[in-house]
Image (cartoon, helix red, strand yellow):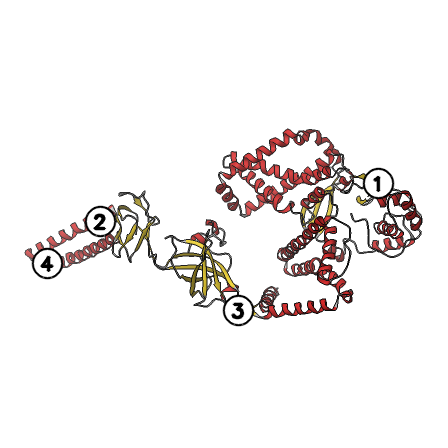
Amino acid sequence: MNTLAPRLPPNLSPLSPLREDLRLHEAAPGKDGSPAWSIQDPVTNRFYRIGWLEFECLLRWPGAPAQIAADIAASTPLAADQEQVEDFARFLERHHLLRLTPEGIKRLATEASQPGWTHWRWWLHHYLFIRIPLVRPERWLAAALPVIRPLFSTSGLTVIVLASLLGIVLVARQWDTFTHGVIDSLTLAGLSGFLLALAISKTFHELGHALVATRYGVRVAHMGVALVVLWPMLYTDTSESWKLRSHRQRLAVSAAGIGVEMALAGLSTLAWALLDDGPLRQATLYLASTGWLLSLALNASPFMRFDGYFILSDLLDFPNLHERSGALARVWLRRTLLGWADPDPEPLPARLRRALIAFALLTWCYRLVVFLGIAVAVYLFFFKALGIFLFVVELVWFIFRPLWLEIGVWRSRWSEVKADRRRWMRILGLGGLVLATIPWAFAISAPGLAHPLRQQAVFSPFPARVAELHPAGPVRSGTPLALFNAPDLQARGLRTNASVQALNQRLAGLAVEDSGIDQRRATSERLGEQLAEARSTREEEDRLRVTAEFDGVWLDVDPTLLPGTWVSTRNQVGILVDPSKWVVDAYVEQRQVERIVVGAKASFRPERHWLSIDATVIDVDSTRSSKLSHAMLDARHGGPIATQAGERQSMPVDALYRVRLVLAEPLPENHETRGRTSIEGTRQSLLWEALKRTAAVVIRESGF
């Protein structure tokens, strides 16, 4: 906690007495070895860390600030002055740690008259985070602690870690099965299972905090549900961990939740690897995936006030990390951009100061992305009118308001900026506006698949047996590639030929016998039918002989297809390609396709290659692609394009348009290759493009 509070009126003299119910706890010394204490407010259950100077002030409280400062300077090595004592008095008064004065009573009355939770203004300011205490778990935590104490031992932790590592190794050996199981579970029933696993995992998470805190003698005041943007999340009140003198013990309390959740995920991973398919294995899949993902991706982040933030604060023994690093970063920005000579809020080593400034800048960027995501989420999750309102509140209150407050400070002190710096800032601002207005040529990146322009995939026309396959290699046009035979077709041909011969003989006999005209006519019609059947049979037999349509390379011949092997119409026996000319089918987003024209320059970089191949646009589809032409681009087959779940065809989720490129030179490998294309687009202005997109979104979303 930063003990030097900003100046707040009124000027307190003489000093008001402290509240009698406050408690003082000795804390761990600071990094410089100076002693530290924490003041506990039992009403709000908040802790305020103070240093040696503030402690000496409390020993002499109340009194005149000048007298207290003089006494401290005379009896201790500290160089205290009246201003420091008054600053500390303002800090105590602001946090209601002093006895109420008439002015304080009026201020509390004003605060009490503010609208409560039944008023819309309260929800406007508190909907992002609301705590609802549900249980006071002290007694049953104390009863459960002896039962689970062995898990906190070295041997217990070692067994859990080794079991988790074994589970990770076993799952890594069947990683495809695990990931496919997760993807296949993304159904309505599967999402219900993930939500149930999330509730179980988070319950164990909070119990971990509570049990470790109880183990160190910290009272867990209450546990309950916190509504984060109206989304329920469990929480545990371990604020009394500030009573602990050792920051390592506070670190153990902060890390216990993630530790328990990762242990549950590790043991679930091992169970999944050992169990047979069934409901129990599916349940362990839910626990493992949710535990690993949320522990590492969400709770471990130090940029929000989750476990990762408190863990980092305790590791560094640096309370109020966000506030103090943010204050340093704001002063650094003012000095760097505006040239102000503002001192740092607190003296720190240069290396630590630079690290805290970098941390604050990363935190601001991270929070910008998170708050934008929350704004979009609240818009999508609620009905449109409320969604738009909450979206605007989120943007204004959490993004624009902090920026506006800082800009307000800059405006109020603009006269302190030197004239030449102001001139350069105006020039840079105008230059940035000009650069945003000028049309620029930006390349368009899109996934694509390269393949020969001419390809002949060979299949059996109907279920048949392989009679002969040409070996892989170069072939000339007209070369037989595959020969199939169909016993049923051969038998039908023999029957048809026999029938034709019999009918011919009968017609010849009827002519000799000079029988009736009707009999000859019927026999002739029957013969015509059999001759047509014979021609049809010969045509079908001709289809069983597949020849090369062009000069090329015969590839991908299955060595297991020996003569006599049956194949279906879906079994590809080989493919003939012309390696001299290659094209790329790229799939471009709808908002980008209008910038592509036929003849534009482009390039294609195959996967796992550094060098790109020049290309030229030869065709742009005028309608969106209803399905992908190549399964290799489908995300379900490891490709980069997401497709509709549950559809048999590869239907893209987004509106994509196919753009065909011709490569300037063939690929060295004679097979289809995934990669990224970079296509030269028409020039566009960044500012105009942003305005168009904003207007399009407003028009699209303005209808109710």
Q: Element under label 4?
A: loop
Tag shown at residue 492: 2
- First in sequence, mark 4 or 2: give its number: 2
Say the numbered circle drawn on residue 703: none
Mark 1 or mark 4: name the one nearer the start of the chain.
1
384 sits left or right of 32 in the view: left
Q: Is mark 3 on a helix, strand or loop?
A: loop
Relative to 335, is 426 above or below? below
The residue shown at (43%, 61%) is 614
Q: Which of marks 4 and 2 is in front?
A: 2
Front residue (pair 84, 307): 84
Residue 508 image offset from top left, x and y in percent: 9, 55
Q: Where is residue 328 in the image (x, y as percent from the top left)?
A: 74, 53
Q: Earlier in the sequence, mark 4 or mark 3?
A: 4
Q: Which of marks 1 and 3 is nearer the N terminus?
A: 1
Residue 692 vs residue 518, the one in the foreground: 692
Q: Mark 3 points at which residue?
A: 683
Query: Dot 2: what SS?
Result: helix
Return the residue at label 1. Answer: 24
Cα separation, mark 1 vs mark 2, equals 103 Å
Q: Position of residue 449 (x, y in %)?
A: 43, 56
Q: Residues within 10 Å of mark 1 (few under 14, many from 20)?
A: some
User: How far apart are the alpha carbons under marks 1 and 3?
Assistant: 67 Å
Mark 1 or mark 4: which is in front? 1
